[in-house]
Amino acid sequence: MEGRIEAIYTAAAEGEPMQGHETVQLVAGVGIPGDRYALGTGHFSDPKYADKQLTLVEAEVADRVGLRQDETRRNVITRGIVLEELIGRRFRLGGTEIRGIRPCDPCSYLEGRTRPGLTRDMAHKGGLRAEILAGGEVRVGDSIEVLGEDE
């Protein structure tokens, strides 16, 4: 199972437009510097959840439900990998090590920003919430390499 990073996005605060990046740094235990969740200014910011550090979604899902990639409000857009299979597993994005924690199901907040019926259309395919174990640089085009089960 191998995929690639197709796009990378951040937003400085809740409701702000997502900004695309070719390259970002991931910081272990924090997220992407300048992103709303690393800053604690996101709609779902809550310091008790390590899995708010990074969110991923499959480009194939965005295509299927008719969303632009930035409309998904996720940090990393992937192609060629089933993200649900990364729950409880460690994997590499570029020069980093990540742990898949739980699904990033779509919610009424996302539906309110996009279109009616989105939560139904993206049910069980809203993406992945992840924790950054070892930081480093990631860039569009980097491969996603599965390392193994979580220890």
Image: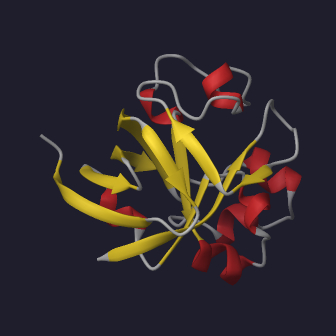
Query: In what quadrant of the picture does the N terminus appear?
Result: bottom left
Residue 120 occupies which quadrant of the picture? bottom right
Q: Is residue 99 left or right of residue 36?
A: left
Q: Is residue 80 above or below residue 10?
A: below
Residue at left offset 29%, top offset 54% = 91
Q: Nearer the viewer, residue 48 or 91?
A: 91
Horizontal and vertical percent position of residue 40: 66, 20
Residue 118 occupies which quadrant of the picture? bottom right
Horizontal and vertical percent position of residue 104: 53, 50
Q: Is residue 75 above or below residue 3?
A: above
Q: Is residue 28 left or right of residue 68?
A: left
Residue at left offset 69%, top offset 33% = 35
Horizontal and vertical percent position of residue 83: 41, 64
Q: Residue furthest left?
A: 151
Residue 104 visible in the displayed image: no
Query: In what quadrant of the picture does the C terminus appear?
Result: top left
Residue 51 visible in the displayed image: yes
Residue at left offset 59%, top offset 35% = 32
Residue at left offset 79%, top offset 56% = 111
Q: Nearer the viewer, residue 54 or 115?
A: 54
Horizontal and vertical percent position of residue 57: 56, 62
